[in-house]
Image (tube, rainbow, N blue to C red):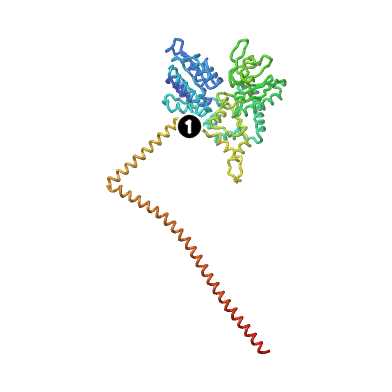
Amino acid sequence: MELPGQISTKIDTLGEGGALTLLTGVAGAGKTTLLEPLVDAWKADRRFSGQGREVIGAAMAWRQADALQDAGIERTFALSNLLAQVESGEFQPTRNTVLVLDEVSQIGPRSLLKLLELQTRTGMTIKMLGDREQAQAIEAGDSIEILRRVLPPEALPELLTTMRQATRRGREIAGLFRDGEAMQALNMKRADGHAMMVGGDRDQVISRIADLYIARRDILTASGTKRGITVSAPTNDDVADISRAIRQRLKARGEIAAAETTHRAIDQRGQACDLALSIGDRVRLFRRTWGTVDGKGQQVGNNGDVVEVLGQSGDGLRIRTKSGDVADVEWRRLRDEKTNRLLLGFGHALTIDAAQGITSDEHIDALPRGTAGVTAFTTYVAESRSRGTTWTVISEGAVLEAERHRQALGDITPITRERLWKRAAEDMSEKPYKALGIDLLGKALHEREAAINTFIECHQAMESAVLADTEAGPKAFRRLRAAAVNESLRRHLTALDTAIAVNSTLARDAAKRAEAAAHLAELRARAQVAAQQMEQAVGQLRRSAGRSM
């Protein structure tokens, strides 16, 4: 357990490091809070400008970038937007600029390369925050691993103490998931009653997840908690189905108005659907959205933000933003330009990637398709969102089906429940680190060096043999030739042995046939002699009978 002084040292290292520094911080390490004094210090640094340094923040998603505003960084960007503004000339960093880059594990090498090239041209400072053990970039390659290989140790501080989980046991379980020790973590959660395998088909599993959400939400609301309960799932389809199931229950309870209007909607993947909206609904925005608050135009949400519907009219929606403001949003601000559909979806659940960075009082790690497709990276994110309990709900039928497919054909070994938990733990412990292009070059160089070393060793052995015996070469040649002759003779002898064996069999068969023929001839001769003797006896009897008459 790191002491606060040691944590402070790591933060000081990030602030006092060179123009490029990477802080590896585990989920819930309180990076945003710990950034506050650094941001204040950078703004007070007047070495390059009398107004202090320009501090900006960026991350892959707007929602993650805007979270840096809590640390005092007023100007934040989604990474794609930042790069677009730099390319268009709308934003030009200088030596006075400090860029704080969050959730670096989700940033691919190509985008990071553009930032590093920009740093080379402008002299800007880049301070990065991330964790290689959390959700990875979709793009090939591993940005954090590349940085770890090229940056000196003093530019790679690590903050491995989490402050999110309120209990020591909760921190221990989250740490086990991070280390890929899912079996031990699941055993602890099962003992606490916080991990369960649910039987039935997918719809029944989703129904159980929705029931758990409602039950825990009621308890947390009654206890006065502020962050509530959140749900994450691996895929967008899972998220949509879980959100619909939760909405049905809230509507049946009267928390969502009965009157609803159906709209043509589309999500960020281009999947179209009919979206029924009522007062009380929670919907997810799929892009940065502009609206009015108290008659003043401003940004009211980002891609991934969940807002509450307060009303709807012919002009647009009235929503409550995540910050609690009441905003009016015109329909045109919500429509996709190509399809004219609303860029909205139900927001009672989030994908694991979208959930990275959020904090709640309780969380449900929902796995209605089993553990196929999850990794230690996504599992760690899903299992480290809450300050209190994280509920793990896994489809038993999906895990059973996956285990059956792995079982050998004809194997009738019973698949026990413990075996299903073991299979789930294996999936949740897998760490598929991405291969790097530079590894291919390194492997080729290694094999080349190995071939050269082998050649040198052989040549040295040959020279040593010649020094010991000047006839070593001819003798070796004769030995090799003799070995080749012996090898050839061995093949011929084998063929000869086979031929002899075959011919012996044929000879034995021929001898047997000759012996049988001789025996038959002898029997035939004896039969002929006996026949002649019988004919002679018959003749004598006939002659004797004639004389008697």
In terms of image quadrants, where is residue 231?
top right
In terms of image quadrants, where is residue 261?
top right
Q: Is residue 453 left or right of residue 3?
A: left
User: In this figure, which residue is indicated by the disc labeled 1?
Assistant: 435
**From the viewer's perspective, is residue 122 above or below residue 525?**
above
Q: Residue 260 or 515: which is nearer the viewer?
A: 515
Instruction: Classify mark 1: residues with Cα within 10 Å, few (<14), some (14-19) or many (20+).
Output: few
Q: Residue 514 or 447: which is nearer the viewer?
A: 514
Q: Amino acid at mark 1?
A: Ala
Q: Position of residue 327 (x, y in %)?
A: 63, 14
Q: Position of residue 389 (x, y in %)?
A: 59, 28
Q: Is residue 311 left or right of residue 499?
A: right
| SS for callout 1 | loop
Quadrant where the C terminus is found in the figure: bottom right
**From the viewer's perspective, is residue 57 above or below residue 543?**
above
Q: Position of residue 258 (x, y in %)?
A: 72, 21
Q: How many marks?
A: 1
Q: Position of residue 64 (x, y in %)?
A: 55, 21
In terms of image quadrants, where is residue 350?
top right
